[in-house]
Amino acid sequence: MPARLHCPGPLREGQVLALPTGPARHVQVLRLQPGDEVTLFDGNGGEWSAHVVKMGRSDVDVRVQAHEPVEREPARAVHLALGIPANDRMDWLVEKAAELGVASIQPLVTERAVVRLAADRAARRREHWQGVAIAACEQCGGNRVPVVHAPVALTQWQPPTDVVRLVLSLAREGVPLLQAATGDAPVLLLSGAEGGLTAQEEAAARQAGFAPVTLGPRVLRAETAPLAALAALTLAGAAR
């Protein structure tokens, strides 16, 4: 199978282009040679066949060939908004969410979140997480790269309105996830950091139209719960 490389578009048939630094390095690590095939995608759907035409010391040129309108995305769009977990768990969460076909990720600073990011560091982390999502799509075959938004405080976040709003809740009145998420409308799933959302944060979410849902009697880690919900929603959509 040819190496899959993300290359910002627009791409067009017959185009000869220099690969960005990351994909070029990937090609060199693989020791590809002129004539070897690669697959390109720009994150907006479909993928392009291409082949290497030049290998330099640090630059790689490829010629774009035919476009294949193949899609491997879930039938239902699921957006995650979540408290930023500590250490490297956010990297892992972004990677796995991208593999599962998440539509977008909104990192949030919540009351119980350990992570606090200054503006300059927040911008760097967003760029890093976006790179993690791109690499995951290169690996898993996804042709639409999920957008990782800039981190924002939960109290300042303005959630989209054209979605089914659900919040992962530890309260007993939460209904089972799939019972609340019927239909095919896009879903926005809100989840807390370690310890979950505070009672005040969840109350504010409910006032904003988020319905409380549960994944069952077990208490899942902050990085596990949103992925379990994402997997359940995408698999349920594929079964319909």
Image (cartoon, helix red, strand yellow):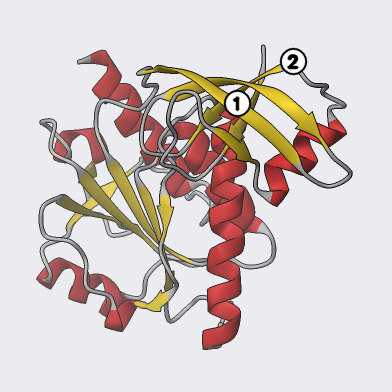
Q: Residue furthest bottom?
A: 118
Q: Amino acid at mark 2?
A: Gly
Q: Which mark is residue 203?
A: none
Q: CA distance from mark 2 to mark 1?
A: 10 Å
Q: Quadrant of residue 152?
A: bottom left
Mark 1 lies on residue = 63
What residue is rendered at 21% in x and 66% in y? 159
Q: Position of residue 28 (x, y in %)?
A: 84, 35
Q: Residue furthest top?
A: 1
Examine the rendered structure and indicate whether residue 186 appears above or below residue 127. above
- 29 relative position to 193: left or right: right
Give how far across and how far down residue 74 sits, in percent.
Answer: 33, 27
- Callout 2 secondary element: loop
Residue drawn at (25%, 40%) of the image: 177
Q: Residues within 10 Å of mark 1 (few under 14, many from 20)?
A: many
Whether residue 163 sits left or right of residue 142 in the image: it is: left
Which quadrant holds the N terminus? top right
- What secondary structure is found at the residue carrying circle 1? strand
Which of 6/172 is in front?
Answer: 6
Placement of 5 over or under 104, stated as above or below: above
Image coordinates for residue 41, horizontal then vertical, percent: 49, 32
The mark nearer the N terminus, 2 or 1, is 2
In the displayed structure, would residue 173 be above or below residue 127?
above
Q: Exactly how many numbered labels are in the figure?
A: 2
Q: Residue at x 40, y 22 (%)?
A: 72
Q: Quadrant of residue 154?
A: bottom left
> Are there few (<14), some (14-19), or many (20+) residues within 10 Å of tag 2?
few
In the rendering, which numbered label is found on residue 35?
2
Q: Residue at x 17, y 34 (%)?
A: 179
Indicate the amino acid at tag 1: Arg
